[in-house]
Amino acid sequence: MVTQPLSVGRRYQGYIRAKWAVIFATLLGTVILMLYAIVAGSANLSVAEVVRTLLGEGDARMNVIIWNIRLPRVLAAVVAGMGLSVAGAVAQSVLRNPLASPFTLGITQGAAFGAAVAIFFLGAGGARNMEHVFINNPYVVVIFAFVGSLATTLVVIFLAKMFRATPEALVLSGVALSSLFQAGTMLIQYFADDVTVASIVFWTFGDIGRATWRDLAIMTVVVLAATLYFFYNRWNYNALDSGEEAAKGLGVDVERVRLSGMFVTALVAAVIVAFLGIIGFIGLIGPHIMRRLIGGDHRYLIPASTVFGGFILLASDTVGRVIISPVILPVGIVTSALGAPVFLYVLARGYRR
């Protein structure tokens, strides 16, 4: 009579250990990949040189390469990937839509429109000898991109609160706003000169290399606070997965959880997109792969999606740096190439169901 409950308990403990094993294995893989990403590139660094420099024993050249270029880029990729992935996991839960991500809320398009406004009207973009295009006032672009991102979120939340929109209607609202912002961006490009158009296109490419230590600090604070908030609400998200009526029966304030989850999700994505540009599909790839490995329990899905998002964005950025070195591909191109098949798979799987 005692053996069976003990056997069930052991199996459950093994089931939980397997989930944490996946999370820690992903974390270990991320640490190893970080070291490789610092070493890889056209500078021909060795692991020993990198370790010595990180310990404060490098020469001037190594300090510049690692502390000013490689390390901020690697850490920014990990932090941004973590934020976008966990934001996607929560968006899919609160909207009860497997295709939900910051993209479907129109956040990236709102950010692109805000950046285009700053570049066109405030002259935040420029070119040197008509060859090297650059953003000469990046913080103005960041502020306008952030405002554009949050504008989309506030409109969607307003529609949800005033008209009690369903989860499906919220996603469709985001799609409509995305189209509106894309039209605005194209209108600006139509009337802009060649240099301004090139500056706008340059900003919209997701590029981890533009991150500074100050940018990294801001992103880290926002992503860490949001992840803790999401994990605090893990039981509410589990209840929502069972349906609204079941969640209400368990005492969950469905509207509050949904709206607050959407706002924090949008805030995370807005900050990342504002600093790094448009990075697609991380919020879709990370949560779906982790669901296949450990299930949909948000006690484990939230930390797993967070860790795996950092791994996959860092891997994508590293591929973009080394695949045709010394030319560096923007990470947005790589993630779009990886994410499009996943998006089509999820869409086809939904229709089969």
Image (cartoon, rainbow, N blue to C red):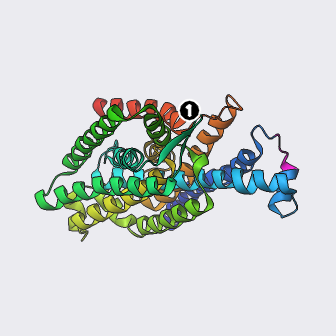
The part of the chain drawn in magenta is: 44-48
Count residues near mark 1 (Cα–Cα under 10 Å), then give few for <14, some for 14-19, many for 20+.
few
Work out whether residue 130 can be spotted.
Answer: yes
Q: Which residue matches tag 1?
A: 130
Whether residue 46 is in magenta: the answer is yes
Reply above or below: 43 against 130.
below
Whether residue 3 is in magenta: the answer is no
Asked whether, in this view, residue 213 is left or right of residue 235, the answer is right
Residue 254: image location, x then y, percent: 23, 64
Task: Assign the C terminus to one quadrant of the image.
Answer: top left
Taking depth in this image into account, of 298 and 249 the one nearest to the observer is 298
> Residue at 22% across / 41% down in the picture?
176
Q: What is the three-letter code of the residue carrying label 1? A: Met
Quarter residue 175 falls in: top left
> Residue at 35% across / 44% down in the picture?
109
> Residue at 22% across / 55% down in the picture?
155
Work out whether residue 289 can be spotted.
Answer: no
Q: Residue furthest left?
A: 163
Asked whether, in this view, residue 239 is left or right of residue 70, the answer is left
Reply above or below: 247 against 166.
below
Please tell me whether the stretch drawn in magenta is mainly helix, strand or loop.
loop
Asked whether, in this view, residue 179 is left or right of residue 139, the answer is left
Residue 234: image location, x then y, percent: 40, 64
Quarter residue 204 falls in: top left
Reply above or below: 22 against 218.
above
Taking depth in this image into account, of 283 and 159 the one nearest to the observer is 159
